[in-house]
Amino acid sequence: MQASDNNALNGAQTHYGACNLCEAICGLEFQVRDGEILSIKGDKNDPLSRGHICPKAVALKDIYNDPDRLRRPMRRRGDQWEEIDWDTAFDEVADRLAGIHEQYGANAVGAYLGNPSVHNYGTMTHSSQFLGPLRTKSRFSATSVDQLPHQLVAMWMYGHQLLVPISDIDRTQYFLVLGANPMASNGSLMTVPDFRHRLKDLQARGGKMVLFDPRRTETAEVADEHHFIRPGTDAAFLAALLNTLFQEDLCKPGKLANFTDGLDEVARAIAGFTAERAAPITGIEAETIRRIAREFAAADGAACYGRMGVSTQAYGSLCQWLIQLINVATGNLDRPGGIMFTKPAVDLIGGPTSKPGHYNVWQSRVSQLPEFGGELPVAALAEEISTPGDGQIRAMITIAGNPVLSTPNGRQLEEALKQLDFMVAVDIYLNETTRHADIILPPTSGLEHDHYDFIFHIFAVRNTAKYSPALFDKPEGAMHDWEIFNALGKRLAERLGNHKWKEARAPHKTVDLGLRIGPYGLLSRHWLSISKLKKHPHGVDLGPMEPCLPQRLQHKNKRIRCAVPELLADLQRLEQELFAATQSEELRLIGRRHIRSNNSWMHNSLRLVKGKSRCQLLMHPRDMQQRGLADGQSVSLSSRVGSVEAEVQASEDMMPGVVSLPHGWGHNRSGIRMSVASEHAGVSINDITDHRYFDPLSGNAALNGLPVTVAAK
Ligand SMILES: Nc1nc2c(c(=O)[nH]1)N[C@H]1C(S)=C(S)[C@@H](COP(=O)(O)OP(=O)(O)OC[C@H]3O[C@@H](n4cnc5c(=O)[nH]c(N)nc54)[C@H](O)[C@@H]3O)O[C@H]1N2
Ligand SMILES: Nc1nc2c(c(=O)[nH]1)N[C@H]1C(S)=C(S)[C@@H](COP(=O)(O)OP(=O)(O)OC[C@H]3O[C@@H](n4cnc5c(=O)[nH]c(N)nc54)[C@H](O)[C@@H]3O)O[C@H]1N2
Ligand code: SF4
Ligand SMILES: [Mo]
């Protein structure tokens, strides 16, 4: 074990690191004695998180100690599981995958990468060791149930899928937010640990936060203004806001005008989307839309930001584009207090390994959905497995993912997984997805490997860098994710006759190189490297975001591209579908996150799930009354694809006409090995989300705004 400090009094050692559970990457201070964690606290000296943590940090200990967590490879025989040794497991996986590859072709082997794969740097650096030799186009990930629209718009407008501007919350005077709940989520595509205090500081300097959300959320409680908005209608609101800026001559792009193309064309294209027309659709008065446009334009630094609620909906790409345009048109891109680009210490954007992204170069086999950056939308995964024909997926690889609970129409996917010839899961639990695998390969847990977050530093509200050494040594007979990928890749390459394959060195070596050649490396005064970071266990502060345009733009002409033809065309869909639709009385379903939960996989920590169930359906009392429902009653919640049973809870915090159920629950499936989670099962919202309800431009699932019905059970 490595430790930075000895506490002479009780023999405990102090160790510093970062939490890798969510995007906030909070600094942690561990007290450890004889291999036991005595305490986990926030690291006050971390330059980004400044001592902040949430209740999940302490659950890192529960995951580490969890007797249900898998520690040896497992092989399924019918409904039974047996432990096997690593070599046997690797050989069997490589034999089966290579066999299917040879018989049915590369695309017959599919892969899905889940969310923790971006929170674990060994997966980022090494999964291609394993997946590369397969050369399959049947690749999927959690991106298409999440932030795909952000990446698509960033690529189109700024030239790189990761060039996503970040709200400068520490300096802004006007923070306009749609569909995000950072008080519960701790921020997303905005790494913002300690959101509460950052917002308090914003308000103390006379700034204001305005929030649009169909639920009066925990964040609404601390915002200055909260407005209900009808789910899925944000694009109409945003178009009207932007149109008001043009109409009332409030656009002042300032220096951006020198390198921005197409704003005029956009102005013409959205001229018909007035505040008056948006009002009855969104539920927001025209005067409110106009007032907010004026306030936004007048503020000395304003930032418009939208997250899950506006990306996982039917107009996700349009929403993200309009948000960028509002910032650009008012000159708030690339200025302190607006939205800005970070300068991360390991630079995946400007560096030699840069992958700007590509779109619609090929399409999914069955429904012709567009690829993005080499991945297909996961809404199409089940049909790619179950539809016969050339290229049908016959084997699946899942890595750090639980798509049965996390992707639309999870029941359908579950049925499809049963039809596979072979499945391997790299995962620490036997859960709703991995139970369908033939072999599960469990890597070390988060506290047993080192970490450098080269993803979330890209999206952080302040430039910092931090290296976290492993808290505990790797136990005897355990393997890190990256070692598993090396071992599998080697065997696969041998079997597939790929002679160019080379074993990749440990992830810290790749990061060390990235740091040295990065913007704070050998050519700067910082000299950052892994060894330098080891000397600064709290992390290194690299300062606030700084203006960097037009140099940082990744289009060859160093210009911002506003008039993206695909998005301009999508405005027609907005007009034809949303504006032409007659107002229906249908209920709309939205999700909900809770500070003590993390997607689907942390419900085996008793300290996080104990107490009253959190998997209730929230509904406005008016809607309940109309249906004769009583508080606490069991109801069936149904959509086009299915039904679940849930307990309804009356809530004045819901917009009338909207109901909310959290995701990540539904641990009542047989055959899983998560004893605590099974006793706090809840139901899965994704048993009823619809794989045909998505943003057609990006293929991103529309998990919010789904039409549903609710009736007494
Ligand atoms: N309806 C609805 N659905 C949603 C959402 C929503 O808001 N509403 N949110 C969506 C979003 S934003 C996301 S990101 C996705 C998440 O979707 P997924 O990534 O598919 O699901 P997770 O619940 O994060 O599952 C993570 C898996 O990784 C495993 N794991 C944890 N740590 C490690 C590790 O270090 N290594 C390995 N190999 N495995 C590990 C866990 O055991 C678990 O099986 O869900 C999406 N689904
Ligand atoms: N505690 C906790 N933290 C997490 C996670 C977790 O599961 N639990 N997951 C992590 C992950 S993977 C992610 S991607 C981030 C997500 O981070 P956020 O996006 O901040 O989190 P959400 O709670 O999904 O916020 C989405 C909000 O959009 C609202 N909404 C729904 N539909 C609409 C709509 O049509 N329009 C508008 N304007 N709003 C709408 C919802 O009511 C909700 O409040 O959180 C991360 N952090
Ligand atoms: S907010 Fe909580 S879960 Fe997220 S990084 Fe910080 S301590 Fe970890
Ligand atoms: Mo996510």
Image (spheres, rainbow, N blue to C red):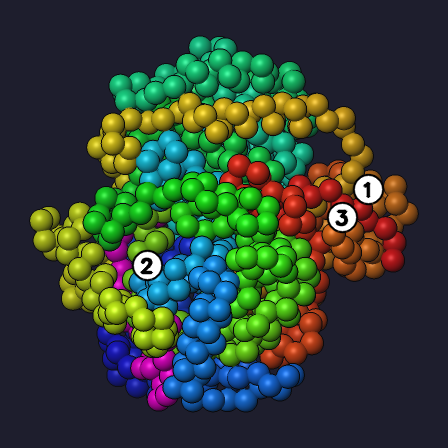
Residue on which disc 1 sits = 623
**Residue drawn at point x = 78 percent, y = 32 percent:** 584
3 or 2: tag closer to the N-terminus: 2
> What amino acid does circle 3 point to?
Arg
Q: In front: mark 3 or mark 2?
A: 3
- Residue toward you, 58 or 457: 457
Label 2 CB less than 8 angstroms from ligand 3: no
Disc assigned to residue 453:
2
Q: Quarter holding the N terminus?
A: bottom left
Give how far across and how far down residue 284 sits, in percent. Answer: 65, 26
Res. 462 in view: no
> What amino acid does circle 1 point to?
Asp
> What amino acid does circle 2 point to?
Asp
- Residue toward you, 618 or 700: 700
Give how far across and how far down residue 452 sits, in percent. Answer: 29, 62
**Residue drawn at point x = 76 percent, y = 48 percent:** 640
Q: In front: mark 2 or mark 1?
A: 2
For this view, does 584 lie left or right of residue 217? Answer: right
Q: Does the magenta-highlighted stretch encompass residue 674?
A: no
User: In which quadrant of the rendered view does residue 611 lie?
Assistant: bottom right
Q: Tag 2, which secondary structure?
A: loop
Q: Magenta residues?
A: 460-485
Q: Tag 1, which secondary structure?
A: helix
Query: How far apart are the alpha carbons under marks 3 and 2?
Result: 40 Å
Give how far across and how far down residue 187 sits, in percent. Answer: 46, 49
Neighbour class for label 2 at 10 Å: few (<14), some, many (≥20)? many
For this view, does 610 lie left or right of residue 637? Answer: left
**Residue drawn at point x = 65 percent, y = 46 percent:** 692
